Every structure is written in C-alpha cells, then in structure tokens.
Image (cartoon, coloured by chain):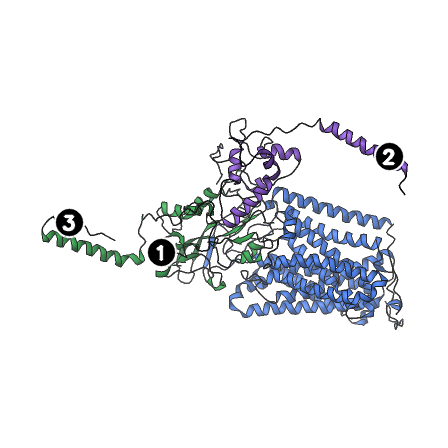
Chain colours: A purple, B blue, C green
Amino acid sequence: MVRRRNVIILTVVALASLVTMTVAASGVPKPDIPRGQGESCVADIDFMRRNHMTMLKHQRDETMLKGVRTKQYSLKECVSCHAVKGPDATPVTVSSPKHFCRSCHDYVAVKIDCFQCHASRPEPIVAVDGGGKE
Amino acid sequence: MKRIIYSEIEGQSAHFYALAAILAGLVLAGLVAAIHMEHYGHYVTGMSNQIVWGMPHVFAIFLIVAASGALNVASIGTVFGKALYKPLGRLSGLLALALLIGGLVVLVLDLGRPDRLIVAMTKYNFKSIFAWNINLYVGFIAVVVVYLWLQMERRMNRFVKTAGMVAFLWRLVLTTGTGSIFGFLVAREAYDSAVMAPLFIAMSFSFGLAAYILVLLAACRGSGRELGDVTLQRLGRLLGVFVAAVLYFTAVQHLTNLYAAEHYGVERFMLVDGGVFTLLFWVVQIFVGGILPLLLVFRSPLSGSLNTGRVMALASVLVIIGGFAQVYVIVIGGQAWPLTLFPGMEVSSGFYDGVVVSYMPSVPEIVLGLGGVALALLIVLFGIKVLRFLPATLANSAVDPHFVAEAKGP
Amino acid sequence: MTARKRNPGNTTGFDAARRSFLSAAVAAAGVTLAPGVMLYGITRPSAAKARALDAAASSDVRWGMLIDSNRCDSDCNECVTACSKENGLQGHGRPATDAQWIRKVELHDPGTGLNKSLPMMCQHCADPPCVDVCPTGASFKRADGIVLVDKHTCIGCRYCMMACPYKARSFIHEALEDQKSHAPRGKGTVESCTMCVHRIDDGRQPACVEACNDSGGGAMLFGDLNDPDSEISQRVAKYASQQIRADLGLDPGIRYQNL
C-alpha cells in the first residue's frame, strides 16, 4: 500500500532536485572546443560527437590486425588536424587541459587512455633537446 | 546420523575487532601499494625485463594453490564419505573461496593494465592456458558457492554429493591448469616438464590443508569452541601424507631433470650453487617445510605431553613457510637462470643474456602480497561471524561416536 | 656481372682480344669470390613495395631477415641506435627495466676461443609461443608473418615474456610521453621489435637493416621469404643459414649465417 503522504514527499524531493540541478548546471561553464583545421573533418560535428569512438575503435583493429592504413579515420590524422598550439606556438600534449580531446573529455568526465600509448601531438616534435632522449 | 549444529561466532570481543582492524589495515596497505605501482609504473618494484614475475606472483600462486587444496577437506567428507570430516566442510568451502579471492586480487592488481580486467574477462585466446585458468578460477568460485549453499541449506543436502564431486574434479583441473602455466613453457629449462602439474596438485593438497588447520585452530580457540584431538590428529596425519607426496614429486622433478644432460646446468644452479635459491630449497623447502613437519605430525605417542593443537599448528606453519619457499624457488629461481640460446657458448650482452639475474623483492610487492593474504583472512573472519560455517563443537565425543576417552591425555 | 661492350667499328683484333680476356678474367674472379664475399656498397633495391593504403597484409608474403655474423662487428651498435631513434625508445638510466627491442650479443666459444657478434631481436616465429600463451590474444601474428602486440588489448600480464625463448619482449615500466606517432607504446603493456612494420607497409626497410647497410656493415638483409626471386630467398637457398633454437620448432623468420 503506497501511502499518499509518501507519494507527496517523494514528488517534492524529486522536483526540488530537478530544479536545483538545472540551476546548478547553468552555472557550469561549457567547454571551449577549439576548431580543427579545414572545413569539416570526416563527417559533420553531430555525427562525430556521437560516433568518433566507434570509428576509432574500428579503425584501430583494421590498422593493427590487418595493416590497413587508410587516412580517413586514422588517429594520426585526427591528432594532426586537431592540434592546438600552446603559448610557445608548438602543439600541446595531452598533459595540457587545452588539448583538443581533453577540452571535451574533461567536461564530460570520460577518461580516455589513447594517449598513454599514442603520441598526442603531431610530429615533428619541436622539443628543446632535439626530441627523444637516447 | 546425529545432526551437526553449526553456529556463527559471537564476534563481539575486543580481540575480534582488533584482529579485524589489523587485517583491514593490511588490505588497505595492499591497495595503496597497488595504486603506487600502477601510477608510477613497475619500475618502482624489483621486477624487471629479466625477472618478469616477482613477489606478487609468489603470493598469488601460493594463495591460489592453497585455495584449491583447502576445499579438499570438504571433498573428503562429501565425496569420500568420511564422517569425521563432515562438520569441517562448510569452513573448508569458505576458506577455499577466501584464499582464491585473495590470490586473484593480488594477481589482478599487479597487472600492467589492471583497468583492462574487463578485457581479460571477455576476450579469450583459448590456446592459452592462462585464458583457461581465468575461466577455471571464476568457475571455481561459482562451483564452491553452489556447493556451500547445498551444504548449508539442509533441504538441499541430498544434492551435496553431486556438487562435491563436481567441486573435487573442478579443483583438480584448476590446479593442473595452474601447474601447466609453468609446465607449458618450453623456453625455460626450469619449467619445461610434465611433472609440474602433479607437483602442483600435491602442493595444493599440502598447503591447503595446512592453511585449513591453522584457520580451524584459530577459529575454535578464538570462539571458545572445543576442538578435540581426534580431529586434530587425523588432519595432522593427513597433512603428513600430503607433505610426503610433495617431497616425492619434488624428487621426481629434479631427478628426471638431472637425467637429461641439457638440464644439468639449471639443476646445478638450483641444487648447488644458486645462492639464495639453493638455501631456500634445501633448508626452508625440504627441511623446514618437509622433514620437520613429518617428524612433528608422526611423532611417537610417547611424547604425548605436548599439546596436540600446538604441535599441529607448528607443523602447519612450517609447511606454509616451506611452501612459500618452494613457490619462490619455482617462480623466481626459474627466471633467474638465463635462457640458453647458444648451447656451449658463453654469451654476454647489454640485456642480461647469459648471466644469472638477481632479484630483490621491493616493499610495494611484499605489501601487495600481504594485503592479499589479509583479504583472504578477513573474508573468513567476516564469514564465520555472519553465517553458520563453524560447527558448534568438534569435541572428541561429538565427532567420533565410537570415541572412548582414554587415560592417554590430550 | 660485367657487360661486354660491343664496339664493332673500333680497333684491331688485338685490342678486342685483350678486352675480351679482361672481361672473362673479371667475370671468373667474381664468380669465384662471390660465395664468401658480400660486396660493399651494392644498393639493395627496396625489398618491400609500398602496399596500397587500404590493402590488408597478405599471407602471400612472409617478411624475414638474414644476418651474416661474419660481417657483424663487435664494436658496432648502429642497428641498436637506429632502432631506438626510429621507435622512440627512451633510456631512463635503468638498464634492468629499460626497453630493448634489438641488442648486440657477444658469443665466445670457450673450447676454441672463437668470438662472434650478432644482433638479436624478436625472431618473428611462424609458430610463436608468445602468441600461444597470451590470454587475451593481444600478442598476434599478422598475415605477413610479423609478430606484434595489440596494445589495445594487452593487459600487461607478462606471460608472453616468460614464454619467449629469445627474451625478445620488454615491459614498459614507466609512463611515457612524446612517443613516435608511428610507434605507439605505453606504460603497463608489453612490446617487442615490430620489424618496423610502419616502414615495411610504406615500402621501406627496417631501420636496423638500413642503418647497417648505410654504415657499411652490410650484415643484415631484409626481404620476402615467400618470393623465390627476392634476394633473401636466393641467399638462403644457396648458402647455409640457421635459426636460433631451431630445435623448438618455431620456424623463426630471422635467419643467421656463419654462426
């Protein structure tokens, strides 16, 4: 038996949370996503936002397991196009919050581990010691 | 047959909470160690490109091997119908689960990418014995949970024998698989042997029973339940038989290796001039972990003034120490010996070819391993408090209907 | 060998005879000396033709290497240096845990006193034990014979490192940054020599082979073992070569001469 008293309390709590969250959310800054080079990359923005992870995952298997190196969905090309220049005019790495992927992924709090292995900025890398210690 | 009463332990005393706190603290320390290793990378450990598996694996393999052996006690009661072991079955299942979980946690936390556990649980290369083992371990947990339920739900007791048989066979396959992890490595001279599988089975019997005896003693003494000598003597003597089996298979392993000239180098290394490995093998594994416990459990009844519980506890502790050394020698010693790429030639390079590699266990590794042990014990502690795993009494008259108290003493 | 120039409108028969004698002599000398001598400075044509970007690797091809230990100098480390540079292998001053894809191995025969030197890397076996033991299938063999680690699937269990008879694999013990874009590598995964798969797919040679040739060593030859017309196939058909630990039956793609 559901008591009327309980239904009223729950509804009030739910509505209050909804209002609070909406008010709070409007206070969170939207991410500042830098534009990549060129017109559009692979597909339009809405499609890419929803599906870029699927395309990357498919491409990685094609490249890794079969050696297919088409450029359209290649991660290297993505990184190259979406490179963001830092204060010293060289592209930033993923350790900087201005990195293209981080600008959105930090906002939605979805951790990616691509750049634990992959280079997060295009080569040639202009580093102080000439790149790569040996 | 008289109905056996099981009950939870009270678990209200200061000692209980102190023990729980210590174990929880160790588990926490283990987690911190794992996070430290994962964050900085494995260079903070003693493991390297030469000694690839270190202390965490020694702990994990010991725990996993002991887990399958701990279930033996329940199997003897259910499958082989020995009345004396029937009251011991529930604790045996709990301990098996706890040890396995503790071992698996250590193993998973030591992975280079523990965040990829889901990948490990969903993508399988079934040519790999490792992949089989993952399935066997998870399946073992499921089988033991069902087995325990069938034991504890009295209305389901009639199915216990089937479950017990399944559990018994499953754990034999599981331990064979664990031994085969090493036995299948053709590249390593210390491992490439079919006797690794039966050796691991014998080790599991021995370590598992030793762990069980210690846990049973601690639980009964701690909760004030009587644990009679009849049970202790039977368990202790069985431990002696298993210890002898381990000694036998160890002898077979080394003797057969010595026969083949190509393995002479690695055998000489292990048995004669391997430094710490030789010391661990002869002194700790064979003497402390093998000969001494045999003397203790099979001692003549003339020295009956010794407390049976203390003697069995000591024997079990020695078996565990010796077992630990055995796993260490197998895992670390087998990797320390260099791969033979060019038979007959002296080899040197910048990548430690041709030299015996040294290994120094690091603090994070040891703490992680201890955390796994603590987790296993914490699970047991928690289990016997909330559910009825422990029999109310294991007094001599309760377990053995034909027992007549003799004037021989304890 | 030497082409005989036809010059019909020229000279006396004496000059022609001298010319033809010289040509024959050089040809004879060449044929006599060729078996034991690899001639310096022959630019080997690119063994790999660049594959079309959307073409998958095919099992029609089997990439392999032939290494002549006689031409490998103890003091030379060109292959190791080139590999480190090409693949972005950073040394951290910790030799026990630093990655090594290729290494120079010095052999000494205590019985005869013979000393030899050779480079050692992933042998790219046809039946790799590392592929057999990998629980997730991350360690795999590509269709054209190159053994690789799929770092997307690698959980870092290091079982393949235990299984490899050649100690070819390295585990990455620390966080990395600024990796080469053609050689992704990261903390917690296992890696080994890829035979510069990114170069092969592009029609070039592995960095170690190129460096060895450029520096004048000429000890390493790369090519397609399945192509009977390739230089490597012709060499292994003609001159004795061996695989390391051939007794294990793994059929490595790397063969050695004059061991």
User: Which residue lies under the disc numbered 1?
Assistant: C229
- Reading the image, the residue beneath label 2 is A9
Discs 3 and 2 lie in a common subunit: no
Provide the chain ID for the residue under circle 2. A
Q: Chain of mark 1?
A: C
Query: Dot 2: few (<14), some (14–19), or many (≥20) neighbours within 10 Å?
Result: few
Q: What residue type is disc 1 on?
A: Asp
> Seen in the image, is B219 located left or right of residue C238?
right
Front position in the image: B51 or C25:
C25
| Residue under label 3 | C7
Mark nearer the N terminus (3 vs 1)? 3
Q: Are marks 3 and 1 in contact (CB under 8 Å)?
A: no
Q: Separation of disc 3 and disc 1 at Cα?
A: 33 Å
- Residue B401 at x, y percent in the picture: 88, 71
- Name the residue furthest left: C12
CA separation, marks 2 and 1?
Answer: 84 Å
Q: Quadrant of the C terminus of chain C?
A: bottom left
Q: Tag 2's secondary structure?
A: helix
Q: Seen in the image, is C70 located left or right of residue A97?
A: left
Can residue B245 be seen?
Answer: yes
At label 3, the amino acid type is: Asn
**Circle 3 — which element?**
loop
